[in-house]
Image (cartoon, rainbow, N blue to C red):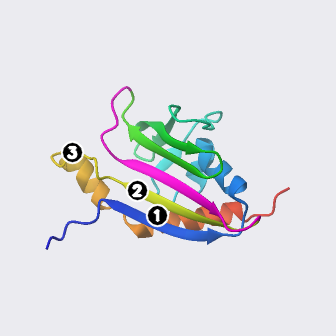
């Protein structure tokens, strides 16, 4: 037995909003800092809405670091996943994924996953930060996302 935390952390929540509305909040990086429950995202420039695997969007973290995020999974209004990295470098091995499962025209189950299973075990700094990511952090993002998605549309 080991006390090593799981290298894949997930949280799910049902949201009273159509999958398309929720997906727009996720797929447009400029909107992500407003609902990020990790207090990690400071900003992302407008005009980076993602549409396909292979695209890259850039974010600035609250500590001032810039991250390039490579889209590695994409299905419009259903799934998007990216691997962050330092600008110009290969992703070190962690992945953020959002999966949307429409339950009805106005209700969607959303699953948020943080997977750090491919991080180099000898990369102490990244592994220490990854271990601090819990289902509670992911749930906080889901709660904030739900509040944003459930607002009346004008």
Residue occupying the point 24% across, 55% down: 128
Q: Residues within 10 Å of mark 1 (few under 14, many from 20)?
A: many
What span is colored magenta in the figure? 88-105
Q: Which residue is at the front of the view, 9 or 101?
A: 101
Q: Quadrant of the N terminus?
A: bottom left
Which residue is the site of mark 3?
Answer: 120
Q: Residues within 10 Å of mark 3 (few under 14, many from 20)?
A: few
Q: Earlier in the sequence, mark 1 or mark 3?
A: 3
Q: Is residue 39 visible?
A: yes
Q: What's the CA distance linking mark 1 and mark 2?
A: 8 Å
In this view, 151 is above or below 20? below
Which residue is the site of mark 2?
Answer: 114
Labels 1, 2: front one:
2
Give the quarter of the image for residue 47. top right
Q: Earlier in the sequence, mark 2 or mark 3?
A: 2
Are the residues tagged 1 and 2 within 8 Å (C-beta)? yes
For this view, does 57 lie left or right of residue 133?
right
**Circle number at residue 138:** 1
Q: Which residue is at the front of the view, 112 or 67?
A: 112
């Amino acid at each position: 037995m080991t006390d090593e935390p799981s290298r894949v952390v997930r949280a799910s929540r049902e949201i009273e909003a159509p999958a398309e509305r929720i997906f727009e909040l996720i797929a447009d990086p400029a909107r992500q800092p407003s609902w990020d429950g990790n207090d990690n995202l400071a900003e992302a420039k407008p005009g980076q809405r993602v549409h396909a695997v292979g695209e890259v969007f850039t974010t600035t973290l609250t500590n001032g670091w810039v991250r390039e995020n490579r889209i590695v999974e994409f299905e419009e209004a259903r799934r998007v996943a990216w691997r962050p990295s330092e600008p110009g470098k290969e992703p070190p091995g962690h992945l953020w994924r959002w999966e949307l499962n429409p339950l009805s025209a106005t209700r969607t189950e959303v699953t948020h996953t943080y997977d750090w299973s491919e991080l180099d075990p000898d990369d102490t700094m990244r592994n220490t930060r990854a271990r601090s990511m819990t289902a509670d952090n992911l749930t906080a993002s889901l709660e904030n996302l739900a509040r944003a998605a459930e607002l009346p549309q004008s």
